[in-house]
Amino acid sequence: MSWGVFDSGVGGLTVVRALRARLPEAHLTYLGDTARVPYGIRSVATVRRYAAEAAEFFRRRRVEGLIVACNTVSAVALDVVESGFPGPVLDVVRPGVAAALEATRRGRIGVIGTPATIRSDAYGAGLRAARDGLVVVSRACPLFVPLAEEGWTDGDVPRLAAERYLAPLIEAGVDTVVLGCTHYPLLRGVIGRVMGPEVTLVDSAEAVAAVAEQRSAALERAGRGEPDRCFVTDAGGAFAEVAGRFLGAPIERLEEVALGT
Ligand code: DGL
């Protein structure tokens, strides 16, 4: 089956990596809106406008299904993507919520993400709607995005940032933390060390890849045998270099595309 994977930039490649492990046959078309990243610090109205343009891009490319890898878009603009794309649309929030509910032992869950994701309370609302009595503590961690892109995923700087950001989660005694941003799986080591070994980290990239695997099997569509393609809205930056770290493999060819035209 062919899937489009949409993200604000390079971060959605963590979802591509998880998808590749489960669906080696799938044909993946990636779009990173590198000209306008980051989305997580923008207004809801702006993110919704960008999301509509991305949905239109994938509708025209005729991919069969669409995976919204970006937590920010999943949190504030999923309805926009769903109404602009004719096939199945998967987001990262619902699978992340389901995985957190499965993981929690004492019903105390931490959620970390971009400011827009945390402000939307999409994870918190999803968790509380699914189970009464949960304690959910959410925290925006905006510096984690540039740290992951710089490759500063270990050492004093990310540790100090993590200690500051995660203090309220530790204080609340959470037993599970949802990594509600594409970039946070790269900081898994430092987040895990700061939270301690008793705390389970839920990776929404992994969670959506598992759902995509089930949906691909249910839809029973064969892969089209086309090569994967990687589109960006600005190929001028360090995308290819940073992408290698997120994907765990080099990107062979980048194609530049303009959205909203
Ligand atoms: N992809 C975004 C997310 O998962 C993080 C980067 C951004 O702010 O655009 O929320």
Image: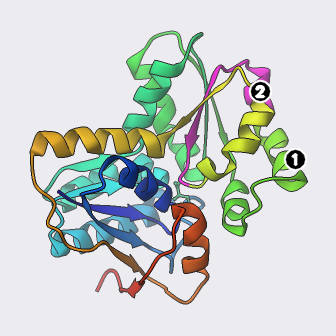
Identity of the residue drawn at 47% across and 66% down: 8
- What quarter of the picture does the N terminus occupy? bottom left
- The amino acid type of the residue labelled 1 equals Leu
- The amino acid type of the residue labelled 2 equals Gly
Identity of the residue drawn at 35% across and 86% down: 257
The residue range painted magenta reads 167-182
Identity of the residue drawn at 87% across and 47% down: 160
Query: Where in the figure is residue 10, as x and y percent of width and height?
Result: 52, 68
- What quarter of the picture does the C terminus occupy? bottom left
Q: Which residue is mark 1?
A: 160
Query: Where in the figure is residue 224, as x and y percent of width and height?
Result: 14, 66
- The magenta stretch spans residue 179: yes
Rendered-image quarter of ligand 1: bottom right
Please, what secondary structure does the residue beneath circle 1 have?
helix
Please, what secondary structure does the residue beneath circle 2 have?
loop
Q: Write down the quadrant of residue 212 in the picture.
A: top left
As drawn, is 185 to the left or to the right of 3?
Answer: right
Q: Which residue is mark 2?
A: 196
Tell me the crowding category of disc 2: few under 14, some 14 to 19, or many 20 or more residues within 10 angstroms, Cα based: few
Query: Where in the figure is residue 62, as x and y percent of width and height?
Result: 14, 70
